[in-house]
Image (tube, rainbow, N blue to C red):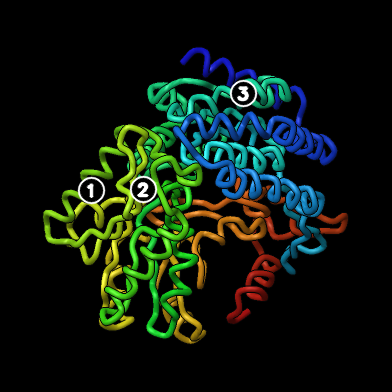
Amino acid sequence: MADLSGLLEAQRLAVLRDGAPGLKERLAALDGLAALVRRHLEDLIAAVSADFGNRPRQETELGELMPLMNGIRHVRRHLKGWMKPQRRGAGLAFQPASARVEYQPLGVVGILAPWNYPLFLTLGPLVDALAAGNRVMIKPSELAPRTAEMLRVLLGTLFADDRVAVVAGGADIAQEFSRLPFDHLVFTGSTRVGRAVMQAAASNLTPVTLELGGKSPVLILPDYPLDKAARTLAMGKFFNAGQTCVAPDYVLVPRDRLDAFAQILMDRVQAMYPAISGNPDYTSIIADRHHARLVAMVAEATAAGAQAMRHRDPGNDAARLFPPTLLIDPPVDCMAMREEIFGPILPIIPYDRVEDAMAFVNAGPKPLALYCYSDDSARVAKVLDGTRSGGVTVNATMLHVGQEDLPFGGVGESGTGAYHGREGFQRLSHARAVLRVGRFNQSHLVAAPYGKMTQWVTRLFIGGPS
C-alpha cells in the first residue's frame, strides 16, 4: 500500500509542478502510444493468446487493436475543438458579463482493467485520460499476467512513472488500488466487484466510472428473417467464446419459431467453427474456475428440464475449450438466467407477444446492451422506447461499442458513466464554470442595506407588484 500511495503522491506532485499539459503534449502522448502498439503488435497479440490458452489473432485485432487505433485517430482529429472553452450565455440580470466553460484535467485517474479484452479495456480508458490531460495509474487483471507484464514494461519505456504507472499484483492489490484517493477511478468488470469498488472509492469521495455487465438481451421480432439474424448473432455471441461484457446473454424469439431458430443458429455456429478442439479460430476460456462454472451452468439447466443443443464437437476440458451450447427455454431461476454467462452458452426463450418480451427484459436489471432485430421502424421504436439499456445495436450485435463517436457505458446495475470519444474526454475532465464581470457591471447596487433599487430589480426579474 505504501508503494501505491507513493506512486499516487508522485503523480499528484507532478500535477502541481507541471500544470495541465497543452494540446501539443497531449497529442504527442497519443502518438507515442499508437506507435508503441504498432511496434509491438505481434508481441501483444502473442501475449493475449498465451494468457487465454488460445485466442485467434483476428479476434485480438478486431476486438481490441482496431477499436483502440480508431479511437486514437478520432481523439486526435477532435481534441483541439474539445479543449476550446465553450461560450455560454450570462443572464440578463448580471450584464455586462461573459460566461464560458473550461475543461480542466481532473488530476490523477486510476484504471482497474479486466482480463477479457486486456488491451482495449486497459488502453482505451488511458487514451481518454491522456486526452483530458490527466496522470494515470493502471492496475491490469492478474488473470492475463503476460499481457499485464508486457503493458507494464512497454508503457514504462514511453512514460515516466509520474505520468503513467502500471501496478502489478493480484486481487489484494486491486482492493488496495480501489481505496486510493484518486481524482477519478475507472473500473471495468463484474457487477459484484463493481459494488465493492464503488464502496471502497466512496470512503475518499472518489468519483467512479463503472463499466459492468449484466444480461444483455436479444429481441427477434416476428418480421425478421431467422437466418439473417443468426449470422450476426452467432458472430457476436461466440466471438472470444462469449467472454465479452456486451455479448448477447439470452434471446427472445416468437414461440412458433423457437425450434427453427435454435437449429438455424446452431447450423450457423457449426459453419463458423467446424471443430472446437484444435481450431485456431476458437478461443479458450480464461481459467479453470470459469470453465467449471460454465459446465455447472449447463448441468443445472438441463437437470431442471431445459434442452441443451450442443456443438457436434464436445470441446476439450483440458484446454478449456467449451463448445457452443444453446439452452432451449431454461427455467428463469436457473444460474444461466440469473447470472451473466460470460461464455459460449446462449439461452433461447419463447414469447407470445412483443409486449411480453419487453416485460421480460424490464423485469430484470437494466442491461449494458440491448439488441433488437426488425425491419419495421415503428416496432423497433416501440422496443427502444419501452426498455432501458446502456447501449443498443439494431439488426446486429456489439457493433455500437466500436463507434468512436458514440458513448459507451451502462445504466443502473450495468454501470455508471460513459466514455469513448467526446464523452470520455468530458468524463475525465472537470467542466469549470467561469464568469467574467464587465467593467460597468452594477451588481453591487443591490447589496445591503436593501432599498428600492433591490426591490425594483427583484420585481423586474421575478414578476409581481412593484
Q: Which residue is mark 1?
A: 297
Mark 3 highlights which residue?
Answer: 165
Q: CA distance from mark 1 to mark 2?
A: 10 Å
Residue 462: x %, y % from top left: 60, 74
Residue at the (47%, 52%) spot, across then down: 239
SS for callout 2? loop
Whether residue 20 is visible here, answered yes or no, is no
Specify which label sits upstream in the sequence, 2 or 3: 3
* Three-letter amino acid code at the position of disc 3: Ala
Please give left or right for residue 14 compared with residue 318 in the image: right
Residue wearing tag 2: 343
Residues at circles 2 and 3 in contact by the CB criterion of under 8 Å: no
Gap in angstroms between the C-alphas marked 3 and 1: 39 Å
What whole-number distance in Å separates the C-alpha atoms at marks 2 and 3? 32 Å
Q: Residues within 10 Å of mark 2 (few under 14, many from 20)?
A: many
Residue 40 in percent (x, y) is at: 69, 30
**Position of 33 relative to 404 (above/below):** above
Type of amino acid at the residue the image marks with label 1: Met
Q: Is residue 161 visible?
A: yes
Which image quarter: residue 161? top right
Q: Quadrant of residue 466?
A: bottom right
Q: Position of 196 compared to 453: left or right?
A: left
Q: Are the two marked residues, 1 and 2, in contact with CB atoms closer than 8 angstroms?
A: yes
SS of the residue under disc 3: strand
- What residue is shown at x 60% (from left), y 35% (from top)? 45
Res. 180 mark:
none
Residue shown at 29%/83% (left/top)? 353
Q: Mark 3 Cα within 10 Å, few/some/many (few <14, many 20+)?
A: many
- Residue 74 place in picture, x, y as percent: 74, 52
Of the two numbered discs 3 and 1 on the same chain, state the one appearing first in sequence: 3
Kind of residue indicated by mark 2: Gly
